Image: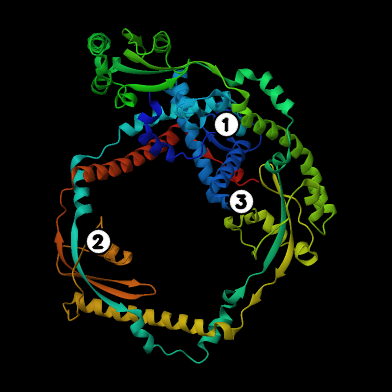
Amino acid sequence: MFDLVRNNKKIVQIFLALIALPFAFFGVDSYVRNAGGDDVAKIGDARITQQQFQQALREQQERLRAQLGQVDPKMLDNPEAHKAILDDLVDQRLLMLEASARRLSATDDAVRRAIAAVDAFKLDGRFSSERYEAALRAQGMNPAMFEAQLRQDLTLQQLAGAIGQSGFVPKTIAERLVALQTEKREVAEHRLALDQYLDKVKLGADAAKKFYDENGPQFETPEQAKIEYVVLSMDALAGQLKLAEEEIKSWYESHKDRYRQAEERRASHILLANDKHGKDQARTKAEALLQEVKANPAAFAELAKKHSDDPGSAGKGGDLGFFGRGMMVKPFEDSAFALAEGEISSVVESPFGFHVIRLTGIHAAKERPLAEVRAEIEDELKKTAAGRKFAEAAEAFSNMVYEQSDSLKPVAEKFGLTVKQSDWLGRAANPAAGPLGNEKVLAAVFAEDSVKNRRNTEAVEIAQNTLLAARIADYRPVARQPFEGVAASIETLLKRKEAQALARQEGEALLAGLKQGEDKLSWGAPKMVSRLDSRLLPPAAASAVLRMDTGKLPGYTGVELPGSGYALIRLTRVEAGQKLDEAQQKAMLGQLGRIVMQEDVQAYLAALRARYKVEINPTALEAK
């Protein structure tokens, strides 16, 4: 109803988790058009082109960079990652085709409400069109592009609701699964500790040296370098800009319409939904509630909690918060904006049913003064100017680091940048290294010319509107540690490896005897473990215990504990699962329901693939 996104939140999270790659912001129509080049996939008569696939790949790289910082491009440059991204694109196309076939589409009203609910678009708790447009501009979008994407997402939610609501776990199966989860097993443990076998290990005189010679790369210190670097970015250029007061005032005067805050109203309502009561009964009940409210206005919130069919607001006494014109369906809006503060409407009919509305607050229209919006204006003007300046500076920066390749100081002085220096770094990309964690940067730094002649690298694009150039300040080549320095650690490693093997051999022999009835071991104190709580045993031992056959007791099992020895376990008693309290049972059944929903969605997507005849072109997918 008035809270579409939140009402379907759990179902939608499960559903959209399986199609994690969002649509590109150029709409469904451009997905269907053939943009040229080899097609990567065909879904019925629709196609996914190489261009569309590469766009999705770039977007996924940007998302990973935003989440993790510097990301190794090779993470997505492999057949497995390409297939995962393509599968997401195919699933999205299938779902939109199915939504179109079912004539599902989000209404304008649903799109407006979803936008108004986004905190990033609010100022002082109220929707701000200026902040909305600024947030979209920062992502290279406009409202039409964003709203088209949002409409697609809301349309998919309609499908998500239909599929997710159908998933359920039969009561008998749910009860059996709960019983298995809560079943407890009493066990005792006999540990063969690795350390007790160390004295039995006798290494050959040359065992450590032989291991050293055969595993030389393990003892090499990789090449390392201390790196000087400079970063040219649009943000850095923006920070250098100074704006004249007249320029800020002129912008404000010519864009005053952007800083006008339209009137907003706050209302509470009681909704009687047609689809729940039937139209005539909903109207009758709304009229009766109106009389109750008029007789006792203070009871409005309690009546809303008890009778309203709007799940998003009923729990809050019917409160809808503040909203502007265009954010509610028209009959509701017209009534709300005609009321005085504290006044109660007559019964109002909308496509959702019948409403009783109470106006609880008014924010009058106002114009935000220059002092309030100065920072926003400065930020926007600087970003615009820096964008133009960066386009000009990027070429000069690239040329200068190449032409004056013996130092980064000239380019730093020209563009007002700081030459920074790293600690020792190796070739492997590491996000913790910040800008120097980029694979392309490290490849350039450790290139032969850079190492041998200490020249500047080329300018490398490490993010959008961000270039980096580097050079080696100090260098350590690959070097093998001397045998004398690692001999003791090799001997310890080999002894522990042999001791582990001895523990395993003795443990397996003892286990065979236990299964033949030869139980003369001293067992530890009994422990109770279950699938819900197995912390008293090592994970490998707990897993083995929970797989044991309970038909004949006592039962025995054994498990190797790498680096620690071997564990023998005796199972002596099984306690049937106990009934959980209401909250625990509800949580567990919720987990089971989500698993079933995931399986239903996967089955649904598989059925769509068969119906629309999905064809994948692996050759085109591998094209660079």
Query: Nearer the observer, disc 1 or disc 3?
Result: 1
Q: What residue is shown with label 1?
A: 135
Residue at the far right: name it.
403
Q: Residue at 77% across / 51% down in the picture?
A: 412
Q: Secondary structure at mark 1?
A: helix
First along the sequence among labels 2 and 3:
3
Q: Mark on residue 73?
A: 3
Determine the CA span between mark 1 and mark 3. Answer: 27 Å
Q: Residue at 18% across / 51% down in the picture?
A: 179
Q: Nearer the viewer, residue 388 or 584?
A: 388
Query: Nearer the observer, disc 1 or disc 2?
Result: 1
Residue 240 drawn at (x, y percent): 73, 41
Q: What residue is shown with label 2?
A: 546
Residue 79 drawn at (x, y percent): 56, 50
Q: Nearer the viewer, residue 315 or 296?
A: 296
In screen coordinates, is 2 left or right of 40? left
Determine the CA span between mark 2 and mark 3. Answer: 42 Å
Residue at the far bottom: name it.
205
Name above or below for residue 119 compared with residue 230: above
Q: Are marks 1 and 3 in contact (CB under 8 Å)?
A: no
